[in-house]
Image: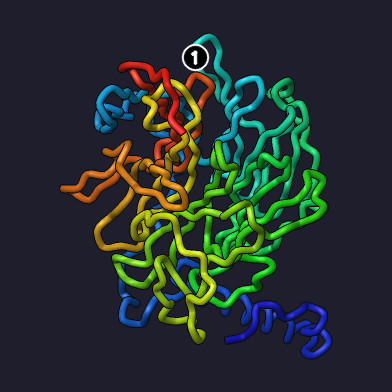
Amino acid sequence: MPSARISAARLAAGFGLTGLLAATAAVELAAQQQPPAWKQGQPPSMADSKLAPHAIPLTVTPLEKIDVGKLKVPRGFKVDVWAHGMPGARMMARGDKGTIFVGTRVIGKVYAVSDRGGKRESKVIAEGLQQPNGIAFKNGSLYVISIDKALRFDGIEDKLDSPQPTDISDAIKLPPSTHHNWKFAAIGPDNKLYMSIGAPCNICEINTGVHALIRRQNLDGSNIEIVARGVRNSVGFDWHPVTKELWFTDNGRDWAGDDGPQEELNRVANNGVGAFYGFPYCHANGIADKDIRRPDPCAGVTMPAALLGPHAAALGMRFYTGDMFPAEYKNNAFIARRGSWNRTKKFGYDVVLARINGARATITPFMTGFLDPKTDAFWGRPVDVLVMPDGALLVSDEQNGAIYRVSYTGRVAQTPSK
């Protein structure tokens, strides 16, 4: 198959104008014949499979059609629509003055949601970006990380009507690849900018210093360090409120069967740097990859703290640090599972609780009802979670362009657990 990276100058020198036009057409045809990235790794036996990623709606669901009554949460909890009207709502970050900033992927926008006396008002503060999924806030500044740009909005909460971004892309140094490059970003307890950079494929050999990793750097872009390697596609991480250790979700490869590999919840032990988590050779709990092989594929691999289900798309996670929920939730992690596409019977489409016990965790359901098990149809796709100052939990829903608020209406916890 012809390379799609033939330079125009080289073609012109060798073929002249007519040859250049013909070769350009050939390159364009070759690019058109390339399978989409999500099909990479698909076995020939599944060439006719109807499995494909679910399209992301470009509009929002009208408020009156969002039926939160279908959602199931433990006794004493309540779910309300907190904000809506944000197509493709994904990752969330809270500003110092209470503004909730919301990133997107295919929509290309960043929203700001302000609470005006109990009524939420949302507005677009950036648009025309390439998958601005990664957002982080620190000391009055909002950081927006897209595929190819890093922007900083200083004093943004006082400039929502006239945002003035500073382009810091040259300093942050983003890789140019597109697939799995919609980053999760956060600023850690060490005041460094952390971001995930996924593998540029479903399954392949990678440049271990560029892709399939979580890295950190100073806010000015200097001193890049790799915190975790062999991380296929993490779209959520947080720091344990007591140990300060980094925990992160990771999404397993596709086209390897309905029941595996599973998604992972991982821990970076003792705030170490550079631990290896297996991709592309070794998947959750020591399963060797069927396509990318090496001797002893799981040697030196840090195994997951918990399994999060096959193809569940476990994304945003936050440790619960509030006082509204019962004490048993304190210092445990909520995880949004966006839901599967590469599986015959759908799985995920919920929020789960990871109960932490040292280096391990146990996964239990928390918020379900987005998926109808009888019809296998879904109506919502949770992507991120965020703990509010009052202890309520926000959950973003990419499918409906909404944010839900989960509150506890029973007895308010008084004694936090460790």
- At a point 57% along the width and 48% down the height, the residue shown is 246
Colour basis: rainbow
- At a point 49% along the width and 79% down the height, the residue shown is 297
Judged from the image, the secondary structure of the residue bearing numbered disc 1 is strand
The picture quadrant where one finds residue 107 is: top right
* Coordinates of residue 135 in the picture (x, y in percent): 63, 40
Q: Amino acid at mark 1?
A: Lys
- Name the residue at the top extreme: 117
Q: Is residue 315 left or right of residue 173?
A: left
The picture quadrant where one finds residue 101 is: top right
* Coordinates of residue 99 in the picture (x, y in percent): 61, 24
Q: Is residue 43 left or right of residue 244?
A: left
Q: Is residue 404 visible?
A: yes
* Coordinates of residue 412 in the picture (x, y in percent): 37, 17
Judging depth in this view, the residue of 239 and 357 nearest the camera is 357
Other residues around mark 1 within 10 Å, as few (<14) / some (14–19) / many (≥20): few
Using the image, determine if residue 271 lies above or below residue 283: above
Q: Is residue 402 visible?
A: no
- At a point 55% along the width and 17% down the height, the residue shown is 115
* Coordinates of residue 356 in the picture (x, y in percent): 42, 44
Judging depth in this view, the residue of 41 and 136 nearest the camera is 136
Quadrant of the image containing the N terminus: bottom right
- Name the residue at the bottom extreme: 14
Q: Is residue 251 left or right of residue 122?
A: left
Using the image, determine if residue 190 lies above or below residue 17: above
- At a point 46% along the width and 48% down the height, the residue shown is 358
Residue topped by disc 1 = 119
Judging depth in this view, the residue of 88 and 92 nearest the camera is 92
Using the image, determine if residue 240 lies above or below residue 3: above
